[in-house]
């Protein structure tokens, strides 16, 4: 990797920072955040502005350019990568280290008195604007919105914003019609006494209208906003995809509908002016509901007194609780995904000893097997295919420079998943194709114990996921080990593989309580720098639990694994398992045999079926 | 309990709310919070203003009186008590219930436009003022500080503010001299670049100067403030207690000291004007450090730009980490406390069957045995002595109206503790003096499993206590049971029995990480309304743990029980324990035998010793 040469680009950026064509007054600093206008985790190429200006293309980072300096804030995952990808014009600000200044403190230290700091108001979330603006103001500077994105003005070969055709999902996939979703949303709005709701997150727009897209890689979403009133529906979306007959029919655009379900289709770019018109027309006590992470531009369109901001929107919360059609779809998707992985692991078992399989080949093979399954759409994230020391890099993605050959002497970690029309998968298995060492087995078994502790946990209704995080670590902690990431995230239903408002992590506190129908991942791990990485990940469904007693009539919950892929028994030190844990593994494998076995049989994949049967032989615990 | 008649008092209060002698402009509402000027948990009689005006004397509650209404906000622990103690003038606002308005929302709903809401600026913490003021302002009202406390103006027989003699603690108790504590504090101040630190919490003043008092029941503190500069020490304290020769000598008031250690003693009431003088004299970049829970009055004395507010002060954090002298003192105190409880339980075992022991008699007997121990000062909180259904009332305190007789048919729960000059204790044991039912044993055993899960937990350095809370609940959760309180709180060293900044609770997130030397309680429970209550509480010391591995060189921690009182084996269903849990109980009891047994022997308490030996027979687990 050689760094991107940015001298000329920075010169151009510093010119437009003073150009009255773009800025009312010159700005002495310009902030380039990571995100897009929807605060998406995965962004389209046209939104990779921070990567364009700096060369650093990791998933998280904020660039700030002043007349003299250019600095990049990123976290520990990306210190090395950012250092490699950026040239000497840039200073790397290592977040999380004690001596690293915050963006605000740094700005205050380098800016001349009374400076203006510019940012694209569509990219910066309102809560972040507020924090930053306050800090700058108290030091005598001003954070100012710059309407035209200054990177876009110098990015001559910027790719077009994607505008790909839409997929309509019928009731067999969604369980609820978009009209019923609108009705439910309006009833939540009535409860909170708000008159308007602004949908800004791309997965929320997609979920609400039972539509999917492919504007962003891995996330089946499309660029759009929606503004829902008590009697109106406005959908802001570009392109001729609204001319597509199935889409028109799905949205009933040409039918005679009750007025409150008539969708007004408007240009994507008109959201701000339309929202400003809504804001201007509000009468006393009419509130507008927005996520507190919505962009500063859209939030400002509504006068402060009329805003109703919440960290989680009612759509985010409704979307997290899957209905029967969705959970059944997720089950089907996970069975197909398991078939693909049984094929893959059977293939790897034969091929790895030949020394011809690299991480990239293995990842491609996994995609090939998945793509053979019905309703496969695309991958749900970039496959983490890593062997030996690469396994210890938690967010690794094989590239030619790092590509390692799988062998019978190293642990192989595969974290991968797919989008199927009926569901989203995300599974990690850690395999050894030779003979693992006692130490590798020991570590694997602690991780497995943590995985089971979460998966088999019983907890009261109303419990937040972060309260389960320590269960996943207890066996590792007992031996002085740990892993430096959360234990689980919410998973969408043929939607984003990471979604709120629930999860299992020591880092969050404001997560919403778990409830039956929510789907999260359970993925403890252990990583030894320079040697190996271990992670065992299932996607699990929150289900009611039967318990002997029922305190305060609250009811209890537990998890049911949706992922049904064998956990390599070769890696397990059975003597470290309790009887209960041993039974859990055996029952899990029995279910893999029954459910995935039947599907392998049906698909005539006999060799993979034999592999499955071999890999799911019951463990025998020595007493 | 008959309610307090408040008609006349409310009339008087409403008059002073309009009286220009006390208010610049009439206030349409007046808030009477629970606290004192130091945000203490336990308050002196002269500070029980909310109880005076309403009759409700629970530990938590806020009264608001308007021209038309009087309302009391309190939480679930006190709904019944508040309803009994207040007359019809009052509306009870049940906090935690869905339909209960917040104080702000209620004020907005009942006040005429543009109202003034008064509060004593010395009683309301700054963070609470900020929240409330903002909410009121956005509805067109104003929160205004009323200098003279309006309750005090009508409280004709208000008790005097206590001003009792001080106790000086030498190095054998404190391990560190007050001068070294000042040096350490100044170094923390230098690190944060602050010039002044204002000590507002009573236990922080006491800790800093190695002094104790008895102005507040159960908490060995005295009314004082301190303001520490880089070269000055000001102690604000009333009474002739500063004339006491040992105190003068301890503080070296009459010695020739380096100027930076010379203590200026000033009247307690002069804190505000002195702090205002400090505030007025600040030059650029000179900051003043205060707790964000300090009173609005003191916080306002410092201009906003010069304030440095933190949730935990450096004293709070330093105080939590006990040094060797303190932990050794705590050990001694807990041994003495165990001697007293062995005596008590031995006595109860003989007396309860006679049917003559009530909850109050048992509590008094516990105090009697404790007071026989060396360096006993007072109880550390009001003894919870509860049998049968009273045990299910978590914050129960026996009074004549509820006083129940202990019997061989009911579970008895005793939560009690004492202040010794060398340490503070807090222990709960749950006993049965007849034959417990299988169900009672089952529940007790789940609670015990939770207690052990926390006590024996190993966790990395830097772990926050709230991450351990679920360990205490797991066994209960498995059977659909739970308890509705946190698992543990910090414990002072001959100081407050509840102290920050650490604890073990699902409710907090902003606790400071546990570190070796911190002392917390471990007290899971189970409560069945109308039948019984179970709680098992030890005070435990955070100590380094030896582990097989040491991930990232972080080191691990675990707990060592300081409390050494037998856990009634009769209540344990041994078959529900794992081998590891069974060993924990046996090793714990072995330590009780050795350590407390030796002390009982030394004190010639042979009958109690025989009881201890009987109660600590090893459990035998049936395989």
Image (spheres, coloured by chain):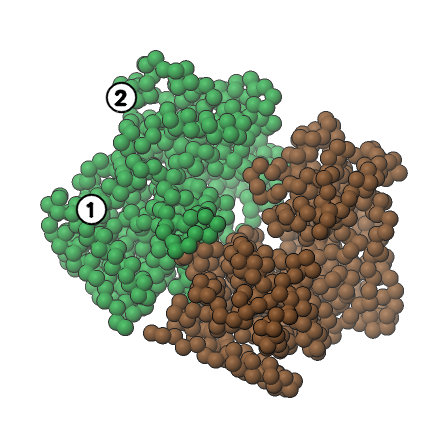
Chain colours: A brown, B green
- A98 in relation to B80, above or below: above
Residue A13's mark? Answer: none
Chain ID at mark 1: B
Question: How far from the left and from the top, in percent, is residue B534?
Answer: 32, 58
Q: Is residue B65 left or right of residue A199?
A: left
Q: Which residue: 78% across, 70% down?
A: A167
Give the spatial CA distance, label 1 vs label 2: 31 Å
Question: How far from the left and from the top, in percent, is residue B102?
Answer: 55, 46
Instruction: Look at mark 2 in the image and give the residue it sits on.
Output: B246
Q: Is residue A97 left or right of residue A45?
A: left
Q: Determine which quarter of the picture holds residue A377.
A: bottom right
Chain ID at mark 2: B
Question: Can I make out residue B240 in this image?
Answer: no
Q: Which residue: 83% across, 55% down?
A: A159
Question: How far from the left and from the top, in percent, is residue A279?
Answer: 78, 48
Instruction: Look at mark 1 in the image and give the residue it sits on.
Output: B340
Label 1 Cα neighbours within 10 Å, binned few <14 / some 14-19 / many ≥20? many
Label 2 Cα neighbours within 10 Å, binned few <14 / some 14-19 / many ≥20? some
Label whose residue precedes the other's in the sequence (1 or 2): 2
Question: How far from the left and from the top, in percent, is residue B58?
Answer: 40, 44
Q: Which residue: 48% across, 55% down?
A: A482
Q: Nearer the viewer, residue B518 or B489?
A: B518
Q: Secondary structure at mark 1?
A: helix
Question: Can I make out residue B473 in this image?
Answer: yes
């Amino acid at each position: 990797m050689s760094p991107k040469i940015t001298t000329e680009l920075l010169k151009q950026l510093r010119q437009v920072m003073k150009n009255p064509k773009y800025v009312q007054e010159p700005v002495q600093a310009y902030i380039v955040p990571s995100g897009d206008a929807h605060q998406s985790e995965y962004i389209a190429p046209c939104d990779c502005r921070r990567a364009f200006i700096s060369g650093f293309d990791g998933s998280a980072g904020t660039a700030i350019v002043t007349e003299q300096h250019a600095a990049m804030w990123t976290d520990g995952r990306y210190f090395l990568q950012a250092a490699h990808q950026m040239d000497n014009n840039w200073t790397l600000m290592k977040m999380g280290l004690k001596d690293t200044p915050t963006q605000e403190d740094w700005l205050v230290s380098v800016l001349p008195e009374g400076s203006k700091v510019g940012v694209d108001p569509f990219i910066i979330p309102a809560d972040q604007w507020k924090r930053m603006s306050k800090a700058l103001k108290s030091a005598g500077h001003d954070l100012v919105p710059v309407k035209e994105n200054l990177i876009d003005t110098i990015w001559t070969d910027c790719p077009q914003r994607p505008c790909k055709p839409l997929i309509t999902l019928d009731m067999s996939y969604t369980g609820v019609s978009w009209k019923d979703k609108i009705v439910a949303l309006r009833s939540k709005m009535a409860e909170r006494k708000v008159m308007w709701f602004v949908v800004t997150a791309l997965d929320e727009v997609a979920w609400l209208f039972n539509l999917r897209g492919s504007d962003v890689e891995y996330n089946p979403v499309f660029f759009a906003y929606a503004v829902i009133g008590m009697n109106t529906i406005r959908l802001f979306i570009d392109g001729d995809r609204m001319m597509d007959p199935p889409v028109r029919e799905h949205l009933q655009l040409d039918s005679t509908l009750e007025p409150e379900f008539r969708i007004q289709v408007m240009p994507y770019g008109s959201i701000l002016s339309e929202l400003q018109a809504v804001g201007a027309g509000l009468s006393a006590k009419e509130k507008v509901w927005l996520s507190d992470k919505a962009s500063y531009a859209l939030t400002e369109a509504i006068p402060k007194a009329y805003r109703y901001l919440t960290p989680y929107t009612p759509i985010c919360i409704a979307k997290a609780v899957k209905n029967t059609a969705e959970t059944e779809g997720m089950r089907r998707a996970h069975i197909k995904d398991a078939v693909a992985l049984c094929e893959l692991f059977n293939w790897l078992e034969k091929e790895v000893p030949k020394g011809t399989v690299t991480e990239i080949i293995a990842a491609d093979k996994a995609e090939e097997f998945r793509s053979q399954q019905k309703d496969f759409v695309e991958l749900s994230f970039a496959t983490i295919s890593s062997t030996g020391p690469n396994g210890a890099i938690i967010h690794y993605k094989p590239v030619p420079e790092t590509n390692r050959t799988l062998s019978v002497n190293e642990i192989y970690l595969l974290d991968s998943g797919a989008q199927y029309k009926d569901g989203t998968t995300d599974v990690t298995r850690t395999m050894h194709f030779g003979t693992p060492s006692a130490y590798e087995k020991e570590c694997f078994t602690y991780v497995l114990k943590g995985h089971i502790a979460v998966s088999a946990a019983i907890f009261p209704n109303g419990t937040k996921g972060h309260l389960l995080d320590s269960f996943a670590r207890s066996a590792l902690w007992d031996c002085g080990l740990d892993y430096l990431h959360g234990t689980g995230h919410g998973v969408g239903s043929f939607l984003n593989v990471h979604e709120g408002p629930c999860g299992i992590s020591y880092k969050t506190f404001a997560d919403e309580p778990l409830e039956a129908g929510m789907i999260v991942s359970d993925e403890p791990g252990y990583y030894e720098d320079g040697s190996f990485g271990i992670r065992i990940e299932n996607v699990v469904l929150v289900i009611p639990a039967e318990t002997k007693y029922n305190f305060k009539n609250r009811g209890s919950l537990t998890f049911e694994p949706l992922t049904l892929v064998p956990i390599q028994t070769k890696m397990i030190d059975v003597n470290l398992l309790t009887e209960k844990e041993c039974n859990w593994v055996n029952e899990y494998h029995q279910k893999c045999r029954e459910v995935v076995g039947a599907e392998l049989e049906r698909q005539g994949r006999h060799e993979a079926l034999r592999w499955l049967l071999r890999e799911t032989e019951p463990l025998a615990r020595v007493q």
